[in-house]
Image (tube, helix red, strand yellow):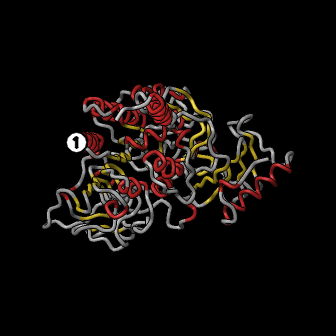
Amino acid sequence: MKISDFQIVCFTVFISLVVLSCDSKSNSEELAEKKPNIVLIYLDDLGYGDVSAYQSGTLQTPNMDRLANEGIRFTNAYASSATCTPSRYALLTGTYPWRNSNAKILPGTAPLIIDTAQMTLPKMLKEQGYQTAVIGKWHLGLGTGQVDWNQEISPGPNQVGFDHAHILAATQDRVPTVYIENGRVVNLDPNDPILVDYEKNFEGEPTGLDNPELLSMKWHHGHNNSIVNGIPRIGFMKGGQSAKWSDIDMADHFLEKGKKYIQEQAKSENPFFLFFPMQQPHVPRTPHPRFEGKSGMGPRGDAILEADWVIGELYKTLEEEGLLENTLIILSSDNGPVLNDGYYDDAVEKLGDHTPAGPFRGGKYSLFEAGTRVPTITYWKGKIQPGVSDAMVTQIDLLSSLAALVGSGEQGPDSQNLLETFLGESQKGREVFVLEATSRTALRAGDWVIIPPYPGPEVQTQVNIELGNSKDYLLFNLQEDPGQEKNLAAENPEKLEELKKIYQEIRSGENKVEQLELK
């Protein structure tokens, strides 16, 4: 059959339109087809000023700086809460933590606070063909509240979307002081069973309160129960001697597990999601001896340098496995900084000119900015162009944003799709956000923040941090006053009433965040 000139022209036009259509796909659409690996690095109590790329402190963090300087450094990014468990809950569920009364700082014996029927970030990614893993600090509860540490522990990370889990149950300063892999305590001797209690000690077991002569680290407040490796902890524990971790080797331990996971996944055709929640610089700060004294700021500074090195080693592993060009790296912190958080470790005495909170007021536990405004970085070699973003983003938004990245239609209850913002393609962020600190909440809306009246002390004296408690409403314009020094509530009553209405609507559930517009 002879093909006419007209047919040739039509075919040529058709091909051109197809090519044009392909070229017109947005960057985010193309990335959804490629299913990139995702590595989420989550530090513990790292402040806005603790990363030198943020140009606020005196510590030098070259590996975090590389991600910041070659990716997007966010200046208006928030954890959902000024404490750890609530932020982790929000991160994995896309839900405000104050909607769940159990999302508060948990003991090591607390039950799992994520409903196993609930959509989570790893579940969403699994549905899109991802292998998923959590390696590091968990602190979201395990089991149903009556855990037998000598049997399989369930439900836990594996029941909320993680194929692989190698974790510490709560925090480094809480018992049980053991690693748990896929529901089983690692290296447990069945002839030396583990017993854990947060109310009373076991007969004959020494404590930090009664046996100070056994301590290598002196407690300041609240950390005077069972002694492990010379360090007094929160809670009581007996047994499990062969399973107990080595504190000074913890960073190396989790790094080894993280590297091994990346290397194994590099051989697979499936994309992977690695949630890597680090223990640094949370207390007890126990950097490996090769980092001791390196910062000049005592164990807290040394632990941050150790964490920075770990991040560099993870980066190097991705590079060696040829994965950097197809891996999105996200780095952030669960809440703001705290210096003395239970131990005498020279964090206050050796601080010098370093400013962990950056230019902000408050810190961990606080409704002021330093409690929840945290360093946040997105890096993707060859895909994200270097830059700085002032857009307001929150960790709650990661679920919906990453769902859009991988082609899922999932939306977290309070999560917004800010994928283009996280990729540096847009400067548009959230308009409003309700932040939380130890069951108290406040509103960030545009350049404004309101903090409702709360009873109680203005300063938590044990940690010497302003809490944001006041008998009156506090109103600040962050654009003009990032340090929140001037309360504008009395002189700007109209703005105060506008924001009170928005705040009350969100807290009562009468309005979705996306529907709210600021005047």
Q: Which residue is mark 1?
A: 260
The N terminus - image quarter: top left
How far across and how far down the image is residue 86, in percent? 50, 57
Q: Amino acid at mark 1?
A: Lys
Q: Is residue 377 something that shows in the picture? A: no
How far across and how far down the image is residue 422, in percent? 52, 39
153 and 3: which is toward the camera = 3
How far across and how far down the image is residue 197, in percent? 34, 69
Q: Is residue 272 something that shows in the picture? A: yes
Direction from residue 394 to residue 282 in the image, left or right = left
How far across and how far down the image is residue 442, in percent? 67, 54
Residue at the location (69% across, 65% down)? 510
Residue at the location (82% across, 55% down)? 497
Residue at the location (39% across, 32% down)? 3
Direction from residue 195 to residue 276 in the image, left or right = right
Quarter of the image holding residue 44? top left
